[in-house]
Each structure stands twice: as C-alpha cells, then as structure tokens.
Amino acid sequence: MRHHAFGRTPFIVTDVGFGAWQIGGAWGDVSEADGRAALNAALDAGMTFIDTADVYGDGRSEKIIADVLKARGGERPMVATKAGRRLSPHVADGYTKANLEGFIDRSLKNLGVESLDLVQLHCPPTEVLYRPEVFAGLDELQKAGKIKGYGVSVEKVEEALKAIEYPGVLSIQIIYNIFRQRPDHLFFKEAKRKNVAVIARVPLASGLLSGKITRDTQFASDDHRNFNRHGEAFDVGETFAGVPFDVGLQAVEEVRKLVPAGASMAAFALRWILMNEAVTVVIPGARNAEQAKANAAAAGLAPLSADVMAATREIYERLIAPHVHHRW
C-alpha cells in the first residue's frame, strides 16, 4: 500500500484504510471476536487509518478499536470518528458546540485517548453547512485540545463543496465507487486545489461490487441492506449506494467482464477508486480477518487501463447515472 499525507495534517496514511461500521453493527451478526480479528488483520497488513463513529453499535466499534490498539501497543494508526448522529431528533438545531463537545467527550472515553485525531460531522442536515457558528465551535474545541482536527462526512456533492468553504475543514468523507462517480466531476478538483483529504466510503456499494450478492441473497433483519432498502432508517444512498437492487445486479454482471484474471471483483472495485489521485484513503469494511486481508491486497493490483476506466464510465452512464447522478 502507498503512504501519503492526510491532506493538511501531519498524519501519514495508507491508501486503503479500515472502515469500522461493520464491527459496530447494522450488518447482521458480526461477533466481537470477528471484529477484533478483522481489525488486527488490517493492522497486520499495514493499514494506518481507521474510520469509525460514535453510533456504530452505540460505541461498540470505538471500544473494540481502543482495546485492540492498547493490546498491540507501538505506533498508533490515525483514528477518525464521527459525531452528530446521536441527536434525536437529528436536526440542524442540535449541532451546538455543547452537544458536539458532549459527543466528543464520550468518544474520547470510548477510544481511551486525550485528543481525537479527527472528528467528522456525521452526515449532518444540509442546513448545518450554512451555520458558521458550528464550525467556530469546532475551532474552539480544537484549540482546547479535545480534537486535533475536523472534517465532514456528507451525502451530497453540493454539501461537500459547501463544507470546504470553511478553512478549518481538513477532510471530506463521501460515497465514491463505480456506481457513484459524480464526485469526480467537480468536487475532487476543488478538494485537490484546497489540499482537503478525501475519504471514499461505501466503496463496494454495500457488497454489490463484491460480485457475491445475487437476487436470492438473504440479509439479516438487523442488516441495513434489509431494513434500509428504501431509506427507512437513514439516507438510502448508504445502502447499495442508492442504486435499485435489480439495476445494481445487472450492472455488476457487466462490470464482472472487466475484472482481470486472478483478481476478485472487490479488489478491482477498490483499485478503480484508487486510480483517482484525489482520493486520500478508501475505507472498505470487513466482517472478518479474511475480508480485511483481501481489502489490503487490492492496493497491489496493477493500475487499470484507460480502456477499462472508459468502460466503467459507460456502464455507469447507461445503467446507473439515471438513478443516482443528480440525487447525490
């Protein structure tokens, strides 16, 4: 894996990181033992970036990370968490300095640290991005030493463009994959210009781009791929990247033809993301050690050819874009 600077921060990260949503919850039954094994495998493979959130398993993900890093000792990877989704109701007025500080204090305890490497507003309502006082509050929390820096996790490209107008925003986390290509149209250029780190999430479109899901695949009742198919619990774009299930399966079969011999579709999909130099780190999740090792190996695939990249763009524009392009 390649190592490079995380935007304007002093952190050096690998281009493939560890997404810790799955070891927290909402992905069916992932035992704590499997979660620990997955994280250890990722770190053994050299990953130096972990992404989590305070609501992943109501703190379970953060606590597993803290325990694993304490047991391992040595140099710590960069750990990014998120705040805001504990609000109920989740509305813009809840994004006060006092509330955010309370969430940050809880994450500090869960992660067992005195200062968070990075806290990200967790897909806040769009209105939050038009409230300078929210970012002024984060500046104050950074000066107080509770956070080393902050960023924003967004649903929409327009939100990303608005967020990076604030000089303190160090990173943007956004969905980017073969089925969600719009960030590359304008946002990535602006992020590079401002040296804003880009964290690419949902890289496998909730498993669709692993090539292992079929029409007959059954998902557990507590798996968001079951309960959030139509956005019942949170933004539908987080589940299968917002692509209608049958359309996604059709597109997967076309993408499958482009995967080089000896490579998995998941590795191909991750390598596709890393072809874009605006991406700082991609954060696939893992349910077990085997998946974590496979994610790490994806960085070693040979660069994809211009013809293959053009073919993926054609599949996107023909099948996927009508459903997602102007929505996110």
Image: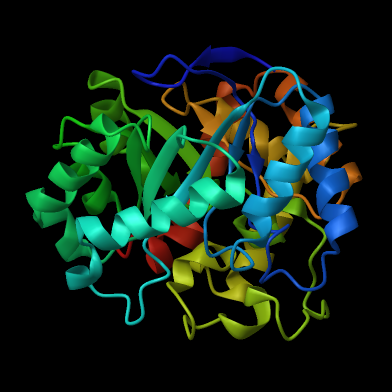
- Residue 151 in percent (x, y) is at 33, 40
Q: Tell me if 237 is positioned left or right of 326 in this view.
A: right
Q: Quadrant of residue 44?
A: top right
| Image quadrant in which the N terminus is located | top right
Q: Tell me if 308 is positioned left or right of 253 in this view.
A: left
- Tell me the colour scheme of the image: rainbow
Please determine whether, in this image, residue 63 is positioned above or below residue 42.
below
- Is residue 205 in sight in this rendering? yes
Q: Tell me if 192 is positioned left or right of 21 in this view.
A: left
How many circles with numbers are drawn on the protein?
0
Q: Quadrant of residue 96?
A: bottom left
- Is residue 259 in sight in this rendering? no
- Residue 33 in percent (x, y) is at 89, 55
Please determine whether, in this image, residue 10 is positioned above or below residue 245.
above
Residue at 57% x, 27% y is 274
Q: Tell me if 153 is positioned left or right of 280 in this view.
A: left
Please determine whether, in this image, residue 37 is positioned above or below residue 217.
above
Along the viewing direction, whichever of 144 and 18 lies nearer the viewer: 144
- Residue 205 in percent (x, y) is at 61, 57
Along the viewing direction, whichever of 75 and 167 lies nearer the viewer: 75
Residue at 36% x, 80% y is 88
Residue at 17% x, 71% y is 93
Residue at 55% x, 50% y is 109
| Image quadrant in which the C terminus is located | bottom left
Q: Quadrant of residue 167?
A: top left
- Residue 187 in percent (x, y) is at 28, 37
